[in-house]
Amino acid sequence: MRRREARRIAMTILYAQACTGYKLDEVLGLLRSMRSEWGVLPEFAEKLAFCVQRNDHDLETEVTQVLENWRFDRLSLIERALLKLGCAEILYFPDIPPRVTINEYIELAKVFSNENAPPFINGILDKLVHKSAKPDIQKR
C-alpha cells in the first residue's frame, strides 16, 4: 500500500480517536474489524499514529507556535489531525522530504476539509518546516 493511503488511514485513526475519546489501541482494533481490507493496517499508518500519540503535546505546541490569529482548539478535528500528522512527519521522519509531506497533507485537506483548508495547511506546515530548519526545504 502506498504512503498516501497510509496517511489517509492515519488521519482516520486520529479523527476517530478525537471523536470517540477511545485509546489508540481501541481505535485500531475497531478499524481493523470494520473493513476487511483494514484487517492489517499499513505499517506507515500505525507508525504515524503512534508517533503522534507519543508526541501529542509537543506536536500541538509546535503547531500552536506558528498559528497566527487562531487557537489550536478552534481548528476542526480534521485540520488538527492533518497538522499533527504533518508536523510529526516533518519533525520525526527525516527520510521524507518536507515538500512531499506538505503536498500530501494539502491533498488530504482538499478531500476531507473545506476549500480554505489546503492553503491553511500549506501555510502552517511550511512555517513548521522553516522553524525546524530542515535543510532540504531550501529552494527545491
Image (cartoon, rainbow, N blue to C red):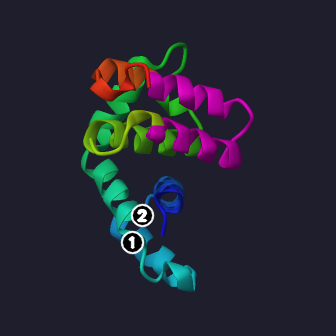
* Point 47% across, 19% down: residue: 67
Name the secondary structure under disc 2: loop
In the displayed structure, does residue 118 sit left or right of residue 138?
Answer: right
Q: Say which residue label 2 marks.
A: 22
Instruction: Say if the magenta span includes residue 113.
Output: yes
Name the secondary structure under disc 1: helix
Could you say which disc has been placed on residue 50 in the image? none
As drawn, 24 above or below 84: below
Whole-number angstrom distance, CA of label 1 to CA of label 2: 6 Å
Residue sitting nearer the eye, 17 or 78: 78
In the image, the segment drawn in magenta is: 100-126
In the displayed structure, does residue 10 sit left or right of residue 56?
Answer: right
Instruction: Name the quarter where the C terminus is drawn.
Output: top left
Q: Quadrant of residue 132?
A: top left
Residue sitting nearer the eye, 15 or 105: 105
Q: Say which residue label 1 marks.
A: 26
Residue 56, percent from left and from top: 31, 43
Instruction: Say if the magenta span includes residue 64.
Output: no
